[in-house]
Structures are given as C-alpha cells and as structure tokens.
Amino acid sequence: MKTDSRTFGTSTLIAKNT
C-alpha cells in the first residue's frame, strides 16, 4: 500500500510538471 501511494504521488508530480 505504501508503494502504491508513492507511485501515485509521483504520477501527480509529473502531471503537475506537465
């Protein structure tokens, strides 16, 4: 679950950067 949260956070960060 912790790994999933980390991946989700990274996805959001990339989306914000885009």
Image (tube, helix red, strand yellow):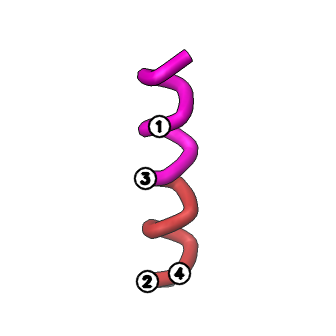
Taking the magenta stretch, the answer to whether it contains residue 17 is yes
Quadrant of the image occupied by residue 5: bottom left
Q: Mark 3 and 1 residues: CB-CB less than 8 Å, in contact? A: yes
Real-space Cα separation, disc 3 to disc 1, in angstroms? 5 Å
- In magenta, the rendered stretch is 10-18
Q: Position of residue 1 (x, y in %)?
A: 50, 83
Residue drawn 52% across the image and 54% down it? 8
Q: Position of residue 10 (x, y in %)?
A: 49, 52
Q: Earlier in the sequence, mark 1 or mark 2?
A: 2
Of the pair 13 and 8, the residue shown nearer to us: 13
What residue would you read off at disc 1? 12
Q: Earlier in the sequence, mark 3 or mark 4?
A: 4
Determine whether the residue tagged by mark 4 lies in a helix, strand or loop. helix
Q: Earlier in the sequence, mark 1 or mark 4?
A: 4
Mark 1: few/some/many CA within 10 Å (<14, 14-19, 20+): few
Mark 4: few/some/many CA within 10 Å (<14, 14-19, 20+): few
Q: Mark 2 and 4 residues: CB-CB less than 8 Å, in contact? A: yes
Taking the magenta stretch, the answer to whether it contains residue 2 is no
Report the disc number at residue 2: 2
Determine whether the residue tagged by mark 2 lies in a helix, strand or loop. helix
Residue drawn 56% across the image and 16% down it? 18
Residue type at the position of mark 3: Gly
Determine whether the residue tagged by mark 3 lies in a helix, strand or loop. helix
Report the disc number at residue 3: 4
Please tell me whether residue 16 is drawn above or below residue 2 in the rendered image.
Answer: above
Real-space Cα separation, disc 2 to disc 3, in angstroms? 11 Å
Quadrant of the image occupied by residue 13: top left
What residue would you read off at disc 3? 9
Q: Earlier in the sequence, mark 2 or mark 3?
A: 2
